Amino acid sequence: MIMAQGDFSVAAVLDAARAMSCGETAQHDGPIRQHPNGWGILWHDNGEIRTLHGAGTFAEALPDIAIDEIRGSFLAVHVRHATLSKNSGVQFSHPLHHTSAETEWFMMHNGFLPTVYQQLGLTASHFDSAEYLHYIADQITPADLTRDYLQEKMARVAPGGSSGNAFFVTQEKAWAWQWYPEDTLFPHYFTLNRYQDKHTHYISSEVIPALGAASDWCQMNNHDLHEFNFAE
């Protein structure tokens, strides 16, 4: 997954997502390099959140996407590798959506949290990412989404998950949240990367040299939270 804010090329960001989904930019320690199980795009345009979802591979879908219709100064793209094969199809594509406390929340998630359903009082998990969004965003306002809040929530989740890395988005703000358990086998794979210059800010699952020299990217620390205010 990748987000961009500021002055950027939509086509370049979409191609970066395609490259990641095909394994072209993979320089990590994880076993997953192909992401063929659906995709989603979110952008902030004139005060409104707009989304586009699809099934299958992003590489096949990209030529048919009307890139000129994607405008604004914020863009996020997610391409899925379904941990569970049953959770495949456009209905499982991110961004996911949840309305609570008069706030519309959108989320893109990278990882697997098979025990988070327990925090919702459910007897079994249906789709861990949707349960994660519900667990984090239910009954809060954007002002409540802080690093301390997220750390406290994740500390309650039983072991067994791989990562809670997420982009959270509302009409006014977006956040990039870095979280994985300290005993993860693949810390590099589950580390988000940042690039920032005077005009553009990228946060991405992988370093994308086509968007900025590899030496100018830096890794986020575990439990880092970066906030973006669309009014600025």
Image (cartoon, helix red, strand yellow):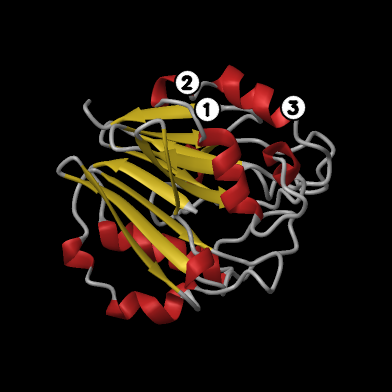
**Marks 2/1: CA–CA distance:** 13 Å
- Number of the label disc, if any, that sits on residue 225: 1
Q: Position of residue 173 (x, y in %)?
A: 34, 32
Query: Label 3 amino acid?
Result: Ala
Q: State left or right for residue 32 relative to residue 144.
A: right
Q: Position of residue 82 (x, y in %)?
A: 64, 67
Of helix, strand and loop, which one carries label 2? Answer: helix
Query: Label 1 amino acid?
Result: Leu
Mark 3 / mark 2, whichever is N-terminal? 2
The structure residue drawn at horizontal position 66% and vertical position 51%, both measured from the top left corner, is: 111
Task: Answer few, some or many: residues within 10 Å of disc 2's Cα (few below 14, many 20 plus, some between 14 and 19).
Answer: few
Of helix, strand and loop, which one carries label 1? Answer: strand
Task: Answer few, some or many: residues within 10 Å of disc 1's Cα (few below 14, many 20 plus, some between 14 and 19).
Answer: many
The structure residue drawn at horizontal position 72% and vertical position 55%, both measured from the top left corner, is: 125
Q: Position of residue 201 (x, y in %)?
A: 36, 38
Query: Label 2 amino acid?
Result: Asp
The structure residue drawn at horizontal position 47% and vertical position 75%, both measured from the top left corner, is: 55
Q: Nearer the viewer, residue 27 or 116?
A: 116
Mark 3 / mark 1, whichever is N-terminal? 3
Contact flag, marks 2 and 1 (Cβ < 8 Å): no
Question: Which residue is label 2 attached to?
Answer: 144
The structure residue drawn at horizontal position 59% and vertical position 73%, both measured from the top left corner, is: 88
Q: State left or right for residue 113 relative to residue 18.
A: right
- Number of the label disc, if any, that sits on residue 155: 3
Q: Nearer the viewer, residue 6 or 89?
A: 89
Residue 205 shows up from this direction: no
**Marks 3/1: CA–CA distance:** 16 Å
Q: Is residue 66 above or below residue 101?
A: below
Q: Nearer the viewer, residue 25 or 183?
A: 183
